[in-house]
Image: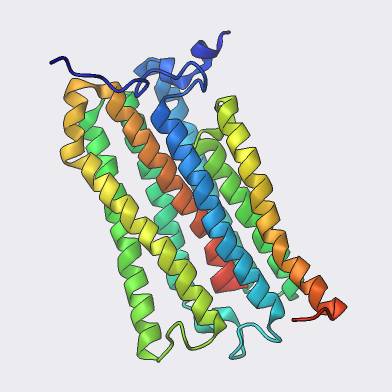
């Protein structure tokens, strides 16, 4: 029985002008914008309705660890360039270079999560749970959801780094497209953090 | 130049190498803008000014990531169309809280 190939995984679809996978990831990211947008909108509503923000007094920067947040921002930005360099290595036909940059991306994502773990631990140690007040409720929801996205990215990127990279041998273009799609997702996760960091830590 | 020739996918590895420098430039710009955001926060500006400034810097950073790392500067029309629709709905979602504020000030029932 002849194998049926999935169409337009490499070649652009005649209607959209791009491969189906890339169109799919952009539609997914559009839905993600609405997910984070709704939560961000809730944050604006809660914050503008509060007589003081944070409700417990002082400044957000007094409650959250700004140096750690800044460090994590730098970590995510660095992981964005390592991700784009991983894709660029595929485009230049260099699989070992791809593995180096993708490995760095996964490692940086893990660093981000470890730092977040220490931040959360410190808050829990001081009995600052989501139920403490609206500030911590919105902080844990937004950073928690973002953290879950980081974990999702780590899983996909680790797959591409490991068993997924076998595709390179049989269809390098298809593999490169997969890396590009994973990259689009990863940059979006970075982009969300670019707004979360000043909104939660600094303002 | 036809659309297919403009597509970076059509470039040879040697031609593609020329694009790498812009990724490094954006990377440095993003780190500098992060430092500026944090630095400005220590100036203890009036809150509306601080919020406006921080969101402008964040938007510039997001624009750089989207334009260069996500290649939106040179994408197909269908993606721009999807993003335009998304931006409209995103703006709508963000303005919803202001409707609630108006309702509150008007003293409508249930507020």
Q: In the drawing, does residue A34 fall left or right of residue A118?
A: right
B83 or A76: nearer the viewer: B83
Q: Residue at x 55, y 47 (%)?
A: B29
Q: Residue at x 32, y 33 (%)?
A: A178
Q: x, y (%) of residue A66?
A: 49, 73
Q: Is residue A183 above or below residue A38?
A: above
Q: Quadrant of the C terminus of chain A?
A: bottom right
Q: Is residue B35 visible?
A: no
What is the quadrant of residue B67 in the picture? top right
Q: Residue at x 61, y 44 (%)?
A: B86
Q: Residue lying farthest top?
A: B1
Q: Quadrant of the N terminus of chain A?
A: top left
Q: Residue at x 65, y 62 (%)?
A: B54
Q: Residue lying farthest left?
A: A1
Q: In the drawing, does residue B62 fall left or right of residue A175?
A: right
Q: x, y (%) of residue A83?
A: 36, 42
A16 or A162: nearer the viewer: A16
Q: x, y (%) of residue B17?
A: 40, 24
Q: Is residue B58 above or below residue A129?
A: above
């Amino acid at each position: 029985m002849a194998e049926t190939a999935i169409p337009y995984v490499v070649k652009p679809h005649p209607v959209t002008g791009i491969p189906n996978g890339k169109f799919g990831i952009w539609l997914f990211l559009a839905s993600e914008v609405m997910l984070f947008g709704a939560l961000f909108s809730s944050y604006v509503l809660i914050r503008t309705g509060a007589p003081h923000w944070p409700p417990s007094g002082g400044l957000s920067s007094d409650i959250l660890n700004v140096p750690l947040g800044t460090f994590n921002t730098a970590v995510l930005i660095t992981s964005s360039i390592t991700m784009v360099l991983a894709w660029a290595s595929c485009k230049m036909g260099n699989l070992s270079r791809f593995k180096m940059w993708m490995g760095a991306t996964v490692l940086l994502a893990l660093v981000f999560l470890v730092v977040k773990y220490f931040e959360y631990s410190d808050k829990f140690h001081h009995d600052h749970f989501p139920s403490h007040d609206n500030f911590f409720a919105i902080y844990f929801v937004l950073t928690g959801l973002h953290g879950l996205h980081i974990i999702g990215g780590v899983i996909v990127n680790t797959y591409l780094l490991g068993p997924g990279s076998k595709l390179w041998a049989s269809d390098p273009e298809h593999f490169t497209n997969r890396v590009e799609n994973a990259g689009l997702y990863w940059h979006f996760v970075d982009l969300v953090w670019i707004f979360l960091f000043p909104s939660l830590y600094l303002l | 130049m036809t659309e297919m020739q403009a597509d970076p996918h059509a470039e040879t590895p040697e031609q593609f190498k020329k694009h790498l420098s812009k990724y490094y430039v954006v990377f440095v710009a993003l780190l500098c803008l992060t430092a500026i955001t944090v630095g400005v926060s220590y100036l203890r500006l009036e809150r509306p000014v601080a919020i406006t400034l921080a969101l402008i810097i964040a938007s510039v950073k997001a624009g750089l990531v989207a334009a260069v790392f996500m290649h939106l500067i040179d994408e197909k029309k269908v993606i721009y169309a999807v993003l335009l629709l998304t931006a409209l709905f995103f703006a709508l979602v963000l303005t919803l809280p202001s409707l609630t504020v108006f309702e509150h000030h008007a003293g409508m029932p249930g507020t």
